[in-house]
Image (cartoon, helix red, strand yellow):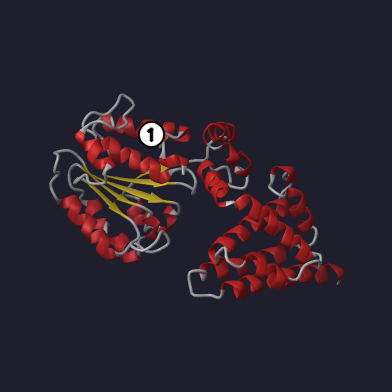
Amino acid sequence: MIAAQSDRLPWHHADWDRLIVCYRLARVPHAIAVAGSAGLGKSAFACRFARALLCLSPLPDGDGCGRCRGCALEAAGSHPDHYIVQPEKDAGGPIKIDQIRQLIDFLMRSSQYGGFRVALVDPADRMTVSAANSLLKTLEEPPAAAVLLLVASALSQLPATLRSRCRRVQLKPPAAGLARDWLATHYPDAIDLLALAGGMPLRAIAYAQAGVGERYTALVADLVAIAHNRQSPVLAAQSWTGIGLRAWIELLQLALAGLARVAVTDCDADRIPSGAQLHMLSQAIDCSHLHDYIEQVTAIRRAADQPLNEQLAIEDLLIGWRTAVRGARAQTMG
């Protein structure tokens, strides 16, 4: 992704400057929680600050110089004072208590280079309850010159006692103009996907790279066809088999979020991807049936990591969509 090439993202400037002021005043918080929606570059922000703390000759803006031995070791992933904790198997897996215990051991050791020891937990909201609770004592009595960076999309999933001991950096979506200008320079093909990505530039890039825009348009077309009895849910499901159940449900949730926005608010449909088609769907289903269907999709989404039959699960959801529309229609006629 583009963010891997440069993590000096313009919507980070204000938050970055505040942390650097703390650094220059020798008041670096012992624990920092970097939070925000996916697509804002939380990991890039945290890694950038870690490099700044480990650099032997920081630049005037606080960034690592990229030339000293500290920067070279960090870039190679071999800095002895930098420790990273991530899920062991995949991005959706848990971070376990044994991993956090090893992190705590690292924080308690002396620095190899006489500076900061920096530990990064990403994503911190994947820690198990026992893993998160094991950090509490360390945060209550933090060792000197040790900085813990927690990256999380859902910071509320962490225990309140843990959150209260962290300095919070809440990254916010950039203004639409800034996001579009940045994408125009770095990835023009993603500009049209910015609205679908909720204004998150890096998410828009990920969508463009994965072909989400075309799939989204095709799925909305299928929902319209099923709602108007022009397409069989079973036949429609066959065309979606192969992209992965989790990916397909996330696509469906995008479409339903757009539909809910059109149905519940007075927003301009032209500003929503496939807005005209979604407006048509909003005439075919009421808010009550839409809410119930969204709950059904959410329940299947929670089970998507289980060994479900992909085609059967998609069939069930598309049949459920037809049932929701017919239920709304019958209620209207009644």
Q: Is residue 173 left or right of residue 90?
A: right
> Which image quadrant for residue 74?
top left
Q: Which residue is mark 1?
A: 16
263 and 85: which is toward the camera: 85
Q: What kind of residue is marked 1?
A: Trp
Residue at image point 70% right, 67% down: 236
Neighbours of disc 1 within 10 Å: few (<14), some (14-19), many (20+): many
The C terminus lies in which quarter of the figure?
bottom right
Q: Position of residue 44 (x, y in %)?
A: 39, 42
Looking at the picture, tell me which residue is in the foreground, 126 or 228: 228
Q: Is residue 93 above or below residue 153?
A: below
Figure quadrant of residue 32: top left
Q: Residue 235, position in %: x, y?
A: 71, 71
**Where residue 94 appears, x then y in whole percent?**
37, 64
Name above or below for residue 230 compared with residue 220. Answer: below
Q: Quarter of the image holding residue 34? A: top left
Task: Tell me what residue is drawn at x 24 percent, y 52 percent.
Answer: 140
- With respect to residue 298, does 86 lie above or below? above
Q: Secondary structure at mark 1?
A: helix
Query: Which residue lies most toward the right here?
Result: 333
Residue drawn at (40%, 37%) of the image: 7
Residue under the image location 43 percent in, 31 percent down: 13
